[in-house]
Amino acid sequence: MSEEIGYNHEALRELAEMRMPYGRYSGRLLVELPEPYVVWLSRQGFPAGKLGDMLRAVYEIKVNGLEYLFRPLRNGSDFRHSGGR
């Protein structure tokens, strides 16, 4: 069970650190993309692969009001600075 939690924790951290690689919001963290843009992307169809999966997750997080999940990672508690725990 602890491995599953660790995996989810790592996936959340990776999502929090991923940046949009192209387009109008190139360089912006995926979790900081404006909700209307993410909704528009969902209507257009997310790209294939890992980026599409991550954008799909951001969409679900935003439309369900779960953005608070990323606050600890944005407020200086990022694992890169705290030793990973």
Image (tube, rainbow, N blue to C red):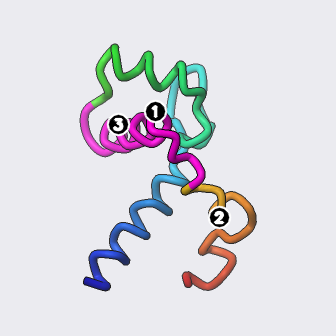
Q: Position of residue 5 (x, y in %)?
A: 34, 76
Q: What kind of residue is marked 2?
A: Pro
- The residue pinned by badge 3 equals 56
Which of the two residues, 62 or 16, is positioned nearer the viewer here?
A: 62
Main secondary structure along the magenta-highlighted residues: helix
Snapshot quadrant of residue 54: top left
Report crowding for label 3: few under 14, some 14 to 19, many 20 or more residues within 10 A (C-alpha): some
Q: Earlier in the sequence, mark 3 or mark 1?
A: 3
Which stretch appears magenta?
48-68
- What quarter of the picture does the C terminus occupy? bottom right
Snapshot quadrant of residue 70: bottom right
On screen, 85 above or below 54? below
* SS of the residue under disc 2: helix
Report the mark closest to the observer, 2 or 1: 1
Q: Is residue 4 left or right of residue 65?
A: left
Residue at image location 31% in from the left, 85% down from the top: 2
Q: What kind of residue is marked 1?
A: Val
| Magenta span contains residue 62 | yes
Q: Which mark is residue 72?
A: 2
- The residue pinned by badge 1 equals 63
Which of the two residues, 14 or 68, is positioned nearer the viewer here?
A: 68
